[in-house]
Amino acid sequence: MRLSVWLVRSIGLVLVTGVTMMSAQAAEDGKRREALAELAKASSVILVGKVKSVGESPARWSGRVPAFQPVTYEVDRYLKGNGPAELVVQHVLVKGSPTAQPGDEPKLSTKLFAAGKVLLVFAEQTDDKQYVAYDERHGSQPAAPATIAEVEALLAK
């Protein structure tokens, strides 16, 4: 009898934990979709491109004054806006962000921005004709087909 009560409680705990984890994942997905929608609206250029090279780091993180590191892309296609086949985008450096290299050395993630990696990039063209990716969380990410389709659907609205 005690074994069956323990078993029922254990199964209940597993079910509650599973539902809680699914709810947390759904909330995270909702935040990601909301961020994508905001970026799609605010960006003057959205591109899918292959990392050709990563420029020199400014040797400091963003603080009161933003710090940027350039990345040169071979553009596969523009989802929004247009531009050249090769484009340099200045990426903001924020310590601890998903686009930053872990640790104390201020630079972009060598894993995310590896040469040959295909990324989805949200950027703005500045008055002096530079392209800047200001969002350190979602502004550059692997170019997953599902994410590209999601952005295309947002742009079609």
Image (cartoon, rainbow, N blue to C red):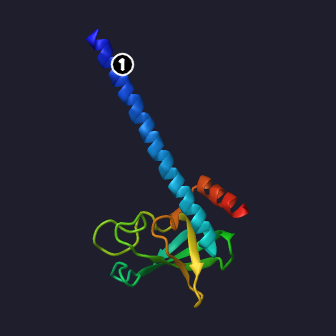
- Vertical comparison of 128 with 31: above or below: below
Density class for disc 1 (Cα within 10 Å; few <14, some 14-19, many ≥20) is few
- The C terminus lies in which quarter of the figure? bottom right
Left or right of residue 35: residue 66: left
- Vertical comparison of 93 with 25: above or below: below
- Vertical comparison of 97 with 93: above or below: above
Across and down, in percent, residue 44 comes to 63, 76
Q: Residue furthest right?
A: 156
Across and down, in percent, residue 88 comes to 55, 80
Please indicate, yes or no, whether residue 143 appears anywhere in the rendered image: no
Left or right of residue 25: residue 6: left
Left or right of residue 82: residue 134: left
- The N terminus lies in which quarter of the figure? top left
SS category of the residue bearing label 1: helix
- Please state which amino acid type lies under the numbered disc 1: Val
Across and down, in percent, residue 103 comes to 29, 67
The residue positioned 40% from the left and 67% from the top of the image is 110
Q: Quadrant of residue 6?
A: top left
Q: Residue furthest top?
A: 1
Given residues 75 and 138, the one toward you in this image is 138
Report the label total. Answer: 1
Across and down, in percent, residue 143 comes to 57, 60
The residue positioned 57% from the left and 70% from the top of the image is 122
Given residues 137 and 31, the one toward you in this image is 31
- Vertical comparison of 31 with 23: above or below: below
Q: Mark 1 sits on what residue?
A: 8
The residue positioned 38% from the left and 23% from the top of the image is 11
